[in-house]
Amino acid sequence: MALLKIAVAAAALALALATIRAGAAGEATLGGAAGASGRYFGAALDPDALDERPYRELAATQLTCVTPENAMKWGSVEPLRGEYDWDRADALVAFAKAHGQKVRGHTLVWHSQLPLWLINGAFSPDELRSLMVAHIAAEAGRYRGAIYAWDVVNEPFTDDGNWRNSIWREAMGPDYVAIALKAARAADPDAKLYVNDYNVESAGPKMRALYDFVASLKRDGVPIDGVGLQSHFVAGKTPADFVAVVQKFASLGVDVAVTELDIRIRLPADDKALAAQADDYASVVRACRETPRCVGVTTWGITDDRSWVPSFFSGYGAALPFDENYRPKPAVAAIIDGFTEKAP
Ligand code: 9MR
């Protein structure tokens, strides 16, 4: 009897969640479409904006995975040495839990958005190694069990395929990546561990450097579960060999995820540009769908009014699936089709 009650309650919950996922008017959603192909659809979110109703509702109904755009970066969580501020990261994790969403943690080890005390601390190599390992233990340990995947190391290479200079590389050489991955595995054994980078979505020196490096991690038995392709694209210029690159990384025996997708348009964005952008979104989704190890797609933001693009690329914007009034752009239907259309 008790078991029956649990089963009935579980079925009711599943139905409620499915109804939420179907969106307000019962229309298809990004997360629902991705789910139909066994994948997730995610977006980077700003936990502060979750207080605003339209933003919160879009995030709750459209997404099956969320990522903190900035809230889990070292500079955000430990602005002063030993003084942690987990509030915004906690809020995002709680939101995801309340809505049955996965969380992609971003990011444990990066050269950017580090706290000033760390950059200016004149620490010795041994101290930096200890600080890095302790940071991973603290953050990945705090969210142990709540994180689907961690971007353990972010952006380790330069565009010409060399190691990017950072306090981590200076202290430990390229070994810092393996040290970080092992520390992350120890802190949260169930999280998928990723290396994440940009300009690796098309064959070239940086893509080959990342490929060769992940192959070497696998050979050496270092815990690495996935490669994140950030995918910050320009409408009309999405790499023609994207599907081949996704499949090449997957051939290493790791998961592949599109982690920071946005497709910027030279403003003003007219109908033609929005249509071209929609085609590009669909082609990214199809590339993922055609690759069994491609687990999901995350966009870097969800609405055009909250995107990093206009402030970093002058004259460009309108890069996300929903516009600044939270209305779906042609990209939304294209993404849904990309996940659900029958194979040709
Ligand atoms: O979107 C983020 C923006 O709000 C921050 O100011 C910026 C700081 O460098 O980081 C942005 O996110 C980046 C991500 O963490 C790593 N890949 C590139 C993203 C866009 O710059």
Image (spheres, rainbow, N blue to C red):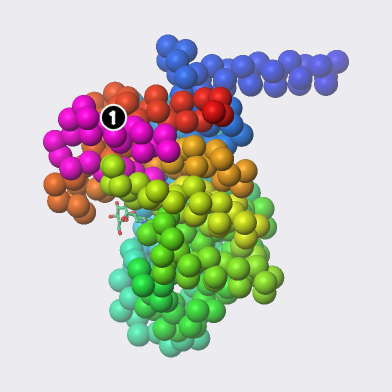
Q: How far across and how far down the image is residue 168, in percent?
A: 44, 77
Residue sitting at x 34%, y 81%: 121
Residue sitting at x 49%, y 83%: 172
Residue sitting at x 24%, y 37%: 318
Q: Is residue 252 left or right of residue 161?
A: right
Q: Is residue 306 magenta?
A: no
Residue sitting at x 15%, y 39%: 267
Q: How far across and how far down the image is residue 117, in percent?
A: 33, 74
Q: Which residue is mark 1?
A: 275
Rendered image quadrant of residue 155: bottom left
Q: Is residue 80 above or below residue 340?
A: below
Q: Count neighbours of disc 1 (C-alpha within 10 A) and say few if under 14, some if 14 to 19, many if 20 or more.
A: some
Q: How far across and how far down the image is residue 91, in percent?
A: 44, 42
From which residue to which does the magenta span run?
A: 260-283
Residue 92 visible in the picture: no
Name of the residue lying farthest toward the top: 25
Q: Quadrant of the C terminus?
A: top right
Q: How far across and how far down the image is residue 329, in percent?
A: 30, 27
Rendered image quadrant of residue 180: bottom right
The amino acid marked with disc number 1 is Ala
Q: Nearer the viewer, residue 64 or 188?
A: 64
